């Protein structure tokens, strides 16, 4: 077995033999049905072209205005960097840093690391710090939120359609394309790049290294399967140097602490205003639910529903689902465990979408910057809400779905191949 390539399932730790799969096929876990990896039909050169285009479109999206707004003869141009700057100037530094990271700096970093890694693999020469780059990419991936920002732009524009005449700018189209490209590129994660490097013969293959003789685990960051000295301690990965734990450390206390903290902060996030709208005649504070009702009144029941789902249903679902997953349970069969794993995948997937309303607030700040006529100022609820999203995402990342499967660890002497599914 020492020479055969192995892949460990992220969700149930089952080992599979890695055999080549045809383009467009998906390899799924035999035990929990998690999609282990897909062989996309896009060639490495195609990925480089996509990444380079995304970087150019990123520049267009942030250089040009999202929209030009006109109120009573005055006109302003709103852009994302302008919105972040204004939020900072108005004294909401936490909010500006948080949204700046998720909508600008981290997606930009993700794109540059991708391009750098793809070019290196193509040139068949890995730089000495390739493993640092991949660890950084693995860390950045969950926090890059351009598609959520794009939806935020649409919501903010609809909210303004009543007050001002809006001329869409070039950036709105650029953000639309960028959201699409970044979603496509999110499939190209650190594990996938390591596999490309393996296929090109540039790094050690993920064949099982049993030199330490202890329990077998795969590296969270690069997917390299190796044996550890013990299940209690963490060892550095033999390939990328990231800390490997047999199972994530103290998932029980960490996840509960984060869930409880998020549930507590969820209260001020909903009670405190997320923004204040000042016009010549009125000065009103808006909470999250107030914003949903306002969208409804403006006639956009579809966007009202989306904001309601993103800001109320998603965070509640995350908190409840994580609590359900954390309650100790007895083994009730593979089918129940598979459902629990699906629930975890759902929380991972919806994680960042609750950031929607926070993006709407900072975008509205830039769009309504007509001092004396109308002004939107972020409220303390927005930063609290952002913190809730971060805490629930950290809770999801701290949870270890493999623990649930450990109670019935199958000890096969033979490592099976994965199951193949054609992608649609
Ligand atoms: Zn699995
Ligand atoms: Zn590693």
Image (cartoon, helix red, strand yellow):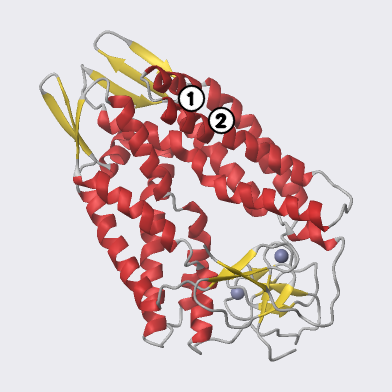
The answer to whether the residue bearing label 1 lies less than 8 angstroms from the nearest atom of ligand 1 is no
The residue depicted at 38 percent of the width and 31 percent of the height is 361
| For residue 9, above or below residue 337 | below
The residue depicted at 57 percent of the width and 79 percent of the height is 21
Q: Quadrant of residue 409?
A: bottom right
In x, y percent, where is residue 1?
Answer: 75, 89
**What label does residue 18 carry, if any?**
none
Query: Is the residue marked by circle 2 packed among few (<14), some (14-19), or many (20+) residues within 10 Å?
Result: some
In x, y percent, where is residue 97?
Answer: 40, 44
Q: Is residue 78 visible?
A: no
Q: Is residue 153 left or right of residue 126?
A: left
Q: Is residue 250 left or right of residue 349?
A: right
Q: Is residue 155 left or right of residue 174?
A: right
Q: Which residue is mark 1?
A: 288
Q: Secondary structure at mark 1?
A: helix
Q: Earlier in the sequence, mark 2 or mark 1?
A: 1
Q: Quadrant of residue 244?
A: bottom right
Q: Are marks 2 and 1 in contact (CB under 8 Å)?
A: yes
| For residue 256, above or below residue 120 | above
Q: Secondary structure at mark 2?
A: helix
The residue closer to the viewer here, 406 or 278, is: 406
**What label does residue 312 carry, if any?**
2
In x, y percent, where is residue 234?
Answer: 72, 69
The residue closer to the viewer here, 213 or 68, is: 68
Q: Is residue 293 visible?
A: yes
In x, y percent, where is residue 151?
Answer: 39, 40
Locate ligand 2 by image quadrant.
bottom right
Q: Disc 2 to disc 1, how far (Cα)?
A: 8 Å
Query: Is the residue marked by circle 1 packed among few (<14), some (14-19), or many (20+) residues within 10 Å?
Result: many
């Amino acid at each position: 077995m020492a020479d055969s390539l192995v892949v460990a399932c992220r969700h149930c730790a089952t080992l599979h033999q890695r055999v080549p799969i045809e383009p467009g096929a998906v390899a799924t876990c035999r035990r929990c049905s998690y999609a282990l990896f897909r062989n996309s039909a896009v060639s490495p050169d195609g990925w480089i072209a996509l990444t380079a285009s995304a970087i150019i479109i990123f520049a267009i999206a942030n250089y040009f205005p999202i929209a030009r707004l006109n109120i009573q003869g005055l006109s302003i141009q709103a852009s994302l960097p302008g919105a972040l700057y204004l939020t900072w100037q108005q004294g909401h530094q936490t909010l500006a840093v948080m949204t700046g990271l998720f909508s600008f700096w981290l997606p930009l970093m993700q794109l540059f690391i991708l391009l750098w890694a793809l070019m290196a693999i193509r040139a068949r020469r890995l730089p000495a710090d390739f493993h640092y780059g991949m660890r950084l990419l693995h860390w950045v991936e969950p926090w890059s939120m351009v598609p959520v920002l794009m939806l935020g732009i649409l919501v903010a524009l609809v909210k303004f359609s009543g007050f001002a005449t809006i001329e869409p700018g070039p950036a709105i189209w650029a953000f639309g394309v960028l959201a699409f490209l970044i979603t496509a590129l999110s499939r190209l994660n650190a594990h996938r790049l390591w596999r490309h490097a393996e296929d090109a013969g540039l790094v050690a293959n993920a064949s099982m290294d049993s030199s330490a003789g202890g329990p077998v685990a795969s590296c969270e960051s690069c997917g390299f399967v190796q044996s550890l000295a013990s299940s209690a301690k963490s060892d550095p990965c033999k390939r990328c140097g990231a800390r490997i734990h047999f199972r994530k450390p103290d998932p029980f206390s960490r996840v509960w602490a984060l869930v409880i903290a998020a549930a507590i902060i969820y209260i001020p996030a909903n009670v405190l205003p997320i923004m204040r709208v000042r016009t010549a005649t009125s000065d009103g504070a808006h909470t999250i639910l107030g914003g949903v009702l306002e969208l409804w009144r403006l006639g956009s029941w579809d966007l009202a529903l989306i904001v309601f789902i993103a800001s109320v249903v998603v965070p509640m679902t995350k908190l409840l689902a994580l609590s359900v997953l954390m309650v100790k349970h007895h083994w009730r069969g593979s089918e129940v465990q598979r459902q629990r794993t699906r629930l975890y995948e759902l929380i991972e997937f919806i994680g960042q979408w609750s950031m929607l309303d926070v993006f709407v607030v900072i975008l509205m700040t830039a769009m309504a910057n007509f001092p004396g006529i109308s002004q939107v100022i972020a409220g303390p609820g927005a930063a609290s809400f952002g913190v809730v999203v971060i805490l629930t995402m950290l809770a999801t990342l701290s949870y270890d779905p493999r623990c649930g499967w450990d109670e019935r660890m199958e000890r096969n002497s033979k490592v099976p191949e994965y199951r193949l599914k054609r992608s649609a």
